[in-house]
Amino acid sequence: MNPLIKPRALFVALGLLLALALWLSLALGPVSLPLADTLRAALRLLGLPLAGEGLAQTELILGQIRLPRTLLGLLVGAVLALCGVAMQGLFRNPLADPGLIGVSSGAALGAAIAIVGGAALGGLPPAFAPYLLSACAFAGGLVVTSLVYRLGRRDGETHVATMLLAGIALTALAGAAIGLFTYLADDATLRTLTFWNLGSLNGASYPRLWPLLLVTAAVALWLPRRAKALNALLLGESEARHLGFAVERIKAELVFCTALGVGAAVAAAGMIGFIGLVVPHLVRLLVGPDHRVLLPASALAGASLLLLADLAARLVLAPAELPIGIVTALIGAPFFLYLLLRGRT
């Protein structure tokens, strides 16, 4: 497959797109800030001694509200796109999604347990509630993914088709459990659970960014080191073994890496769909299946797309805010249908 664009040109374009998305994400919102003042205030927040008058309010809005939110969107978009590339390489299917191994549904179940269980116990201390919710979501994603991986193991080998079926079954089971918790929840708890399942970058803070930053950095550093192995897996597992790759270990690492990355992203921002499906597939159409290019390009594109989706979520119904999961679904679902129809022609 010949790439439609050279990798160097793509990276330049994606870098410029990400810079623009970052700039607009910081400047625009219910209170719009002048673009020039936004840039100067952001540089001053980074410690650069720039002259500027009347930037105190701009620096306050950026430093306390928009910068944490923008950084959260950047990290979530990048890690979801990277995990989407990993799953599409593992399943050797460009329409695969990280949700196939149950990590998203497991995280949603963990969050439902924390939200409904906390309400049943009379409420959690406000200082610990966000962290406990994130921890339960992260743990739920890891537990369900571990079960999927264990069910997919037989005779010392990981059977991808069996793992896929196990993921579908456990996703349905987790969905039924979430439905039960939704039925048992009172009105206030139901509202919290519903908004969490729709995804949002609202409420971002620097303390909550650190766990996701560490996980995203680990995923972004590890996956490119397995780019050649992912390229070999595209030829088939037998061919990859003949080329000297430890296929079983690589499959286990890909599943664990995806569970870690998606679990952390869902724990930080709720359920945000289609980033892991749309971004890798679109980048693959542009530059081909070489994971040495596909992985970093997808990370840049995923971060840009999520920042632009969050910007749309803030502006469409301003001053109200549309859940970002709705925006990504409105983008991703038509694109997915287009891919299906394109594949039939």
Image: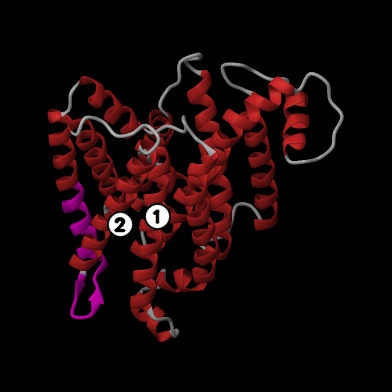
- How many callouts does the rendering have? 2
Kind of residue sitting beneath label 2: Leu
> x, y percentage for residue 240?
40, 79
Residue nearest the viewer, comparing 329 with 114: 114
What label sits on residue 137 in the rendered view? none
> x, y percentage for residue 131?
38, 42
Residue that label 1 marks:
94
From this viewpoint, is residue 93 visible? Answer: yes
Q: Is residue 217 above or below residue 208?
A: below
Q: Secondary structure at mark 1?
A: loop
Q: Is residue 170 above or below residue 125?
A: below
Q: CA distance from mark 2 to mark 1?
A: 24 Å
Residue lying at 24% horizontally and 35% vertically, measured from the top left? 118
Quarter of image, res 155: bottom left
Residue 194 vs residue 224: left or right? left
Q: Please tell me whether residue 196 belongs to the stretch shown in magenta.
A: no
Nearer to us of marks 2 and 1 is: 2
Q: Is residue 290 above or below residue 202?
A: below
> x, y percentage for residue 249?
36, 76
> x, y percentage for residue 190?
23, 26
Answer with mark 2 or mark 1, whichever residue precedes in sequence: 1
- The magenta segment is 153-171
Residue lying at 64% horizontally and 46% vertically, measured from the top left? 14
Residue nearest the viewer, comparing 124 with 235: 124
Residue that label 2 marks:
142
Residue nearest the viewer, comparing 160 with 34: 34
